[in-house]
Image (cartoon, helix red, strand yellow):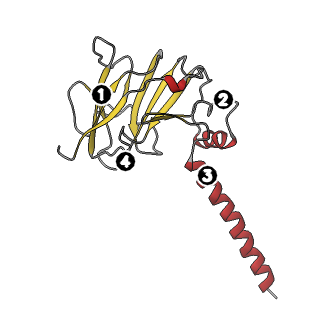
Amino acid sequence: MFRVPFLIAVALVIAFGGGVWSTILALDATVGFGAIKLGAWEAFPEAQTDKADPYAKSHRANAGKLLYASAEGLTFTANVDETGARLAGGCSYRITGHTPPARFWTLFAAAPGAPAPSIQSDLPTALNSRIILRDKDGNFDIALSASARPGNWLAVPAEGNFRLTLTLLDTPTAGSSGLIDLTMPRIERTGCGNA
């Protein structure tokens, strides 16, 4: 007597649970379609516009992030170095070169999925275009490691993987279709452990 309703209830739980699980998995898997990859850096130029695909719209709604108009800003992320190896907290890295033209830019490192670091930290967990030291050609050299380094130093998590986030604000790059021609800073591993 209760066998048929029980089987229907089990089927409904599996169907709805599987649907919710697969939707959450799809939203966490990607920011959307239309990624631009420049070396180790990746950006989604249309993810914040009205032309964004449904996955990008759902992803940004779920994250609750501040959105920029297409000409206001563009966010690049890097999970790997120039060789394609994951960025690891136990290693040290160098970021060299320059950013595409922008009135202001910010750079920070955080664990994947973690929020931006707190400004209350005693370590330099974020850098920006106003405080960075440059050479006479306008290029910079930033050391990334868990332990202090001279010059431009960005503190990274001591353990686990991390992601770099570079946000260009008030940049002609964001509204440009010529993103492929841009030159991004290089991310090179300089050592691991105590090396």
The dot on residue 26 is: 3
Q: Locate residue 12: give its quadrant.
A: bottom right
What's under tag 2, amino acid-wise? Thr
Q: Give me the C-alpha separation between circle 3 and circle 2.
A: 20 Å
On the image, which quarter does residue 105 sit in? top left
- First in sequence, mark 3 or 1: give its number: 3
Residue underneath mark 4:
161
> Which badge, 2 or 1, is on the more N-terminal residue?
2
User: Sequence order check: which comes first, mark 3 or mark 2?
Assistant: 3
As measured in the structure, the alpha-carbon distance from the residue carrying label 2 to the one carrying label 4 is 30 Å
Indicate which disc, 4 or 1, sits on the residue closer to the N terminus: 1
Q: Which residue is mark 1?
A: 142
Residue at 32 percent across and 43 percent down: it is 157
Locate the N terminus by quadrant: bottom right
The three-letter code of the residue at mark 1 reads Ile
Q: Which mark is residue 49?
A: 2
Q: In the visual, does 104 lie left or right of 189?
A: right
Do the residues under discs 4 and 1 have CB atoms within 8 angstroms?
no
Asked whether residue 51 is in view, the answer is yes
Amino acid type at circle 3 is Ala
- Callouts 3 and 2 close, C-beta under 8 Å: no
Query: Could you tell which of marks 2 and 4 lies nearer the N-terminus?
Result: 2
Residue 146 in percent (x, y) is at 26, 40
Which residue is farthest right?
1
Circle 3 Cα neighbour tier, 10 Å, few/some/many (<14 / 14–19 / ≥20): some
Question: Separation of disc 2 and disc 1 at Cα?
Answer: 32 Å
